[in-house]
Amino acid sequence: MVGMLKLETLHDRGLADDFSTVLRRRMMGLARGTTVAALAAGHSYSPLVRSGIVRGDIRRSFGTATGAARGVSLDIRLRITSANSGRPLPDYAVYLWQCDQDGNYSLYDGGLDQENYLRGVQTADSAGWARFTSVFPGAHEGRWPHLHVEIYPSLACRDLLYSGKVALPGDACEKVYATDGYTATLDPAAMSMPLEMASVTGDVRRGMVATRTLSV
């Protein structure tokens, strides 16, 4: 366990706020006034799925946005389990979002207000695994490198069960930040209270793999 990340800003708020921002900026062909609760009918044909946000590869923007994130490949594997029994929780929905290699967030940071890449929803498989294909994040100002995660009991995305940040280990960050395209540096002062730490394997040429079990 390491420290909890400091600060809270617009990009920390989660799926409800993020999706409302996407809709307000008309980045999808959905009716005005649609909400996350109204979007998700809990089956594969729901408007939430049709919107494009339910996807494993989050490197490109969805809907009418066309941008793509660059950086070292990162395969994110999150296992969702019961805090009581330790058993996997299939079909639970995971919303994951993160900053890009420059430490900036789509939707919110300068020049990215019309992009929505590096955010997506996946459901856990029969073994509890939810997987995303992404890029290794940079370090947002004042933050330790991390991934944002929310967990819901289904694609209906109601009844938020978990909201937190999964940090990335310093040794992996240093390897990635030494490659072309990254300018981030680690700031130990960005850590304070305990939070989840991922295990990261792989290399910068073939890509990194981040793994973490989250119990709800």
Image (cartoon, rainbow, N blue to C red):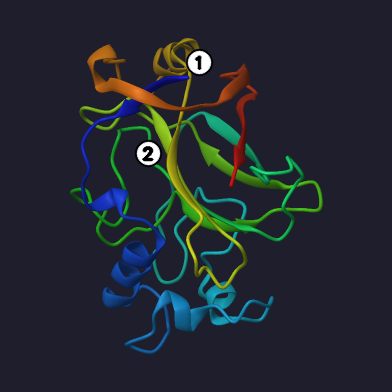
Above or below for 186 versus 44: above
Q: What residue is shown with label 1?
A: 172
Q: Quadrant of residue 210?
A: top right
In front here: 159 or 178? 159
Residue 140 in sight from this viewpoint: yes
Q: Nearer the viewer, mark 1 or mark 2?
A: 1
In front here: 138 or 82? 82
Residue 183 in sight from this viewpoint: no
Residue at image x 58%, y 47%?
216
> Disc 1 vs disc 2: Cβ atoms closer than 8 Å?
no
* Residue 29, numbered circle: none
Extreme residue toward the left, this view:
110
Marks counted in the figure total 2
In the displayed structure, does residue 86 sit left or right of residue 64? right
Residue at image x 26%, y 15%?
187
Q: Amino acid at mark 2?
A: Asp
Q: What residue is shown with label 2?
A: 100
> Crowding near pointer 2: few (<14 within 10 Å), some, many (20+)?
many
- Secondary structure under the numbered disc 2 in the rendered image: loop
Residue 153: x, y in percent? 61, 62
Residue 56: x, y in percent? 62, 53
Q: CA distance from mark 1 to mark 2?
A: 16 Å
- Secondary structure under the numbered disc 1 in the rendered image: helix
Residue at image x 27%, y 73%?
25
